[in-house]
Image (cartoon, rainbow, N blue to C red):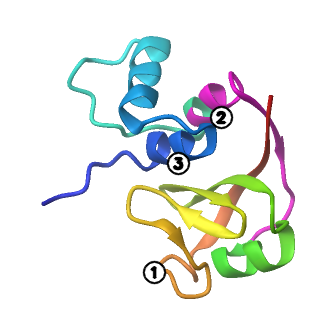
Amino acid sequence: MSIKPNCGPASVAKIVNLPVGEVESLFRETFELAPNWRGRSTIFECVCILTSFASASEVDGRGSVAGFVRNHTTKTGTYFIRVGDHFMAIKNGLIYDNHFDGADPDTCKWKRKRVSHAFKINLH
């Protein structure tokens, strides 16, 4: 079984507490994507969808995923991050994406990846 390249919609879905399919439909409608679109997205598209549900403020902290969680997040906070061409949600100190559903940032396979973009999310 292959994993769809839908880390953006999967991470957004986790943040806004909606099914991934519903969030993918929002991407298709908002950005006029083809019905067979498989989920590949940009930081602009993800943040645009997120801001329909929440405020998103950019966080200055960078470094590895594990270091970012340790140094720049709160235990009850929600964050949306980009590492390379991959997007992840951080909720309550755990990692969520299309591979993980609540992974420990110190042991997940992305722990050493460098955070290039980070947003603190506050749901409306």
- First in sequence: mark 3 vs mark 1: 3
**Disc 2/disc 3 C-alpha distance (Å):** 11 Å
Which is more foreground, mark 2 or mark 3?
3
The residue sitting at 12% across, 60% down in the picture is 1
Answer left or right for 80 relative to 70.
Answer: left
Asked whether 74 falls inside the magenta stretch, the response is no
Q: Which residue is mark 3?
A: 11
Which secondary structure, mark 1? loop
The image position of residue 27, as x and y in percent, is: 45, 23
| Quadrant assignment for the C terminus | top right
Q: Nearer the viewer, residue 57 or 20?
A: 20
Crowd around label 1: few <14 · some 14–19 · many ≥20 (10 Å): few
Q: Residue furthest bottom?
A: 107
Mark toward the start of the polypeptide (1 vs 2): 2
**Separation of residues labelled 1 and 2 (CA atoms):** 24 Å
Query: Label 3: how many residues lie within 10 Å, few (<14), some (14-19) or many (20+)?
Result: many
Asked whether the residues under the numbered discs 1 and 2 touch, taking CB atoms below 8 Å apart as contact, a structural biologist would say no
Amino acid marked by disc 3:
Ser
Report the Cα–Cα distance between label 3 and label 1. 16 Å
Res 22 quadrant in image: top left
Is 52 included in the stretch rendered in magenta?
Answer: yes
Relative vertical location of residue 79 with respect to residue 67 in this rendering, above or below:
above
Question: What range is drawn magenta here?
Answer: 46-62
Number of residues whose C-alpha sits closer than 10 Å to that of mark 2, classed few (under 14), some (14–19) or many (20 or more): some
Residue 120 in picture, x, y percent from top left: 80, 49
Q: Name which residue type carries label 2.
A: Val
List the residue tagged with mark 2. 47
Which numbered marker is on residue 109? 1
The residue positioned farthest toward the left in the image shown: 1
Nearer-the-camera pick, 30 or 17: 17
